[in-house]
Image (spheres, rainbow, N blue to C red):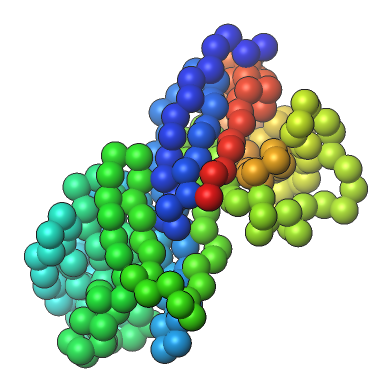
Amino acid sequence: MITSTFALTRLAADGARLTIDLPVETGTLEWHGHTRIAAPGLLRAFSLAPAGHSKAVPTHIFPGGRAETFRRRGYDLRLYEAADRSNSCLIWAGPYHEATTWFNGPAPRQSVLNSLAAAIEFADGPEGAKVTPRLKVGTQQFGTSVFGISDRVLIMALDARTARESLPDWQGMARGDVEVWKDALALDPEQKAALTGTPYEWRYTFASPTAVFTVMFPKDGTEAAALRNSRDQAMVDAVLGGVRVEWAA
């Protein structure tokens, strides 16, 4: 049973605008994203997160490594490199969000970093950050997703135009103009035994006219008895019955 829903707007990295309806039982989600950009001499993946996530890089990922900050109008560029130069990353850090691209090895030389920074436009705002190529000719942006995370719910959304080919061949359950499928998660035997018979053993996939989105309820199965309580079941029922995503490119 759905008590009430609220609508929020999120901006995908490629500039698409998402309208997301969520039941109040969903609670607060932390919003992240992903995108890829390909151009002659450039193939980069970018992960997006709320501002502040990169604070763990110098202390937990590259302790004792190199760190540099370059000021830009509206954001900072932060370069981090492991002490042994085995890995590095470049972060566009805005007031609301940050975008990170990783290098499997030492930080590129300054001229390469300058070219990369010049090729990417970063625009940050409360509803999301855009990470797009400055030159559109000969450039492709793909693999863009937006996902909301809490300790109870994971919701990931994709553009239906590019994601429909990933849907099952068989028809899903109809819910208005939305189709719904569920498939079993890849669980180890202990998790599977603990989660069997609960909503936590499934991945739920929805296809609206403009978006494909999946919903999962993360549980490790260590508290199997608690998985079947009425409060958790009410939350699951509300989310599955009320969530909706529309993707406007």
Residue 208 is situated, as x and y percent measured from the top left of the image, at 69, 38
Q: Residue furthest right?
A: 170
Q: Residue furthest front?
A: 137
Which residue is located at x 51 percent, y 73 percent? 140
- Image position of 227 with respect to 248: above or below: above
Quadrant of residue 78 in the image? Answer: bottom left
Which residue is located at x 28 percent, y 44 percent? 125
Which residue is located at x 73 percent, y 54 percent? 164
Q: Quadrant of the N terminus?
A: top right
Relative to 39, 191 lies left or right? right
Quadrant of residue 179 in the image? Answer: top right
Residue 231 is situated, as x and y percent measured from the top left of the image, at 58, 15
* Count of picture labels: 0
Relative to 28, 230 lies left or right? right
Residue situated in front as seen by the camera: 147 or 128: 128
Q: Can you see residue 225? A: no
Residue 115 is situated, as x and y percent measured from the top left of the image, at 26, 83
Residue 47 is situated, as x and y percent measured from the top left of the image, at 40, 60
Residue situated in front as seen by the camera: 136 or 205: 136
Which residue is located at x 70 percent, y 31 percent? 199
Residue situated in front as seen by the camera: 186 or 242: 242
Q: Can you see residue 246? A: yes
- Image position of 121 with respect to 13: above or below: below
- Image position of 32 with respect to 133: above or below: above
Residue situated in front as seen by the camera: 169 or 183: 169
